[in-house]
Image (tube, rainbow, N blue to C red):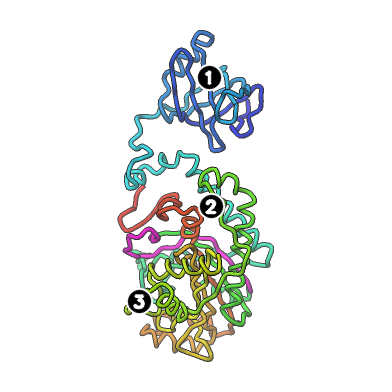
Amino acid sequence: MKRTYVKDLKEGKCKIMGYVEHIRDKKIMFIVIRDVTGAVQVTIEKDKMPEIYEEARKLTFHSFVSICGDCVFSEYVRNGGKEIYPTSIEIMSIADVLPIQSDSGQDLRMDYRWIDLRDEKKVFLFKIQTAFERYAVEYFNKNGFIEIHTPKITAISSEGGSEVFELKDYFGQKACLTQSPQLYKQMSMMAGFDRTFEIGEYFRANPSFTSRHDTEFTGIDVEVSFIDSHHDVMDIEEALLAYIIEHVRNDYNEEYKKYFGKDMVELNYKIPRIPLLEVYRILKEEKNYEVPRVLKGDLDPDGERLISEYVKEKYGSDFVFIIDFPTKSRAFYSMKKEDDPELTKTYDLLFKGIEITSGAQREHRYEVLKQNIIEKDILPETMSEYLEFFKYGAPTHGGFGLGITRTLVKLFDLPSVKDVTFLFRGPNRLRP
């Protein structure tokens, strides 16, 4: 008999497969079986089906089974009023006593992440991640983007050498894991691809232990040609996010409310765009807060949280673009503003208090780019391969990188990116 998922059960013969979520054994045994779509009660009457009852007595919490039987509907039964009377039970495996419980500490639960994820709410998080990426790709396909897959092992650092995982030996050469596809997606602009995107894994040797940092993460990267400024890039990202959120809401808002007790966020408005220097003024005058001097040129976590609070209060927006960062605080490939070379055509996108995106118009002129590298105290010869991209013609271009886990953690208002990562990697987390 072909398998039936719990959500598709109808009255009559059926075959379900899943794990044991609950067992209650008195005169009648009640077993709750869960699969990826839901849970259903299996009822075993000892007197009427003694052989099946004896087999079922071997089951433990989280054992995996295949059960054939008759599905009936009853208003007295939980889990959607469906109940199965089994005609056979096949035990796939008997589970040992679980090493974690739902209230175990996060580090211990991370050690046994595959068990920790046997939870309908946590499964739902990954359904949303799947939909998030699916609708991102759908938007790109509808708007003329070409998908690329850039190398994750490289000889060049996208940031000039910072936070790089170096490989011990790459066939006698020096190599490192890619921090971002920045340089290669720019190469695709010089190839004439016009609009490209990638969803991929990236690596940062960042020793931070905060709730927003990880050393391996998944990002959506975008690059587009023939732009006038970073505002063109922001327009694209705003349209992308609005498309994704609208479609994910349409598919999952009711289920989201079931788990989180509220509606999913909407993005049916223009996201405010505020220059960084204006942000400093707002923080000082409206929130009585000043970014520490050592961090001037950027925002610290408290500054991000407070400006997001201000934007929510004034504009009703969960998102805000912070624009026009100082040249000294941005990467060498950022284009300087024509009317003020101390500032760059760059931006960060904040979502409910944390940065989820950095974006910019890139410098496409070879000599200017070379000078920028020198000004950042980076030896031009270390970036010679990258500079080569620009020698033979380059269009105006720009793009952004969107962190999926940071976006999702705020979509669900959860404490840490660990909660929305299948297997988290951080400074002290290399297993499982």
Q: Earlier in the sequence, mark 3 or mark 1?
A: 1
Q: Nearer the viewer, residue 280 or 87?
A: 280
Residue holding disc 3: 295
Q: Position of residue 132 (x, y in %)?
A: 57, 55
Q: Earlier in the sequence, mark 3 or mark 2?
A: 2
| 106 falls in the magenta region | no
Whole-angstrom CA distance, mark 3 to mark 2, is 33 Å
Tell me whether circle 1 and circle 2 mark residues in contact (CB < 8 Å): no
Q: Is residue 8 above or below residue 269?
A: above
Q: Is residue 156 visible?
A: no
Q: Position of residue 375 (x, y in %)?
A: 39, 87
Residue holding disc 1: 43
Element under label 3? helix
Which class describes the residues within 10 Å of circle 1: few (<14), some (14-19), or many (20+)?
some
Which class describes the residues within 10 Å of circle 2: few (<14), some (14-19), or many (20+)?
some
Badge 2 amino acid:
Gln
Q: Position of residue 408 (x, y in %)?
A: 50, 56
Residue holding disc 2: 129
| 195 falls in the magenta region | yes
In this rendering, would 376 be left or right of 317?
A: left
Q: Quadrant of residue 98?
A: top left
Whole-angstrom CA distance, mark 1 to mark 2, is 35 Å
In this rendering, would 232 be left or right of 374?
A: right
Badge 1 amino acid:
Thr
Count how many numbered circles sit on residues in the image: 3
Q: Earlier in the sequence, mark 1 or mark 2?
A: 1
Q: Which mark is residue 361?
A: none
In this rendering, would 81 be left or right of 107?
A: right
Badge 3 amino acid:
Leu
Element under label 1? strand
Q: Which residues are magenta?
A: 194-215
Q: Is residue 18 above or below residue 335?
A: above
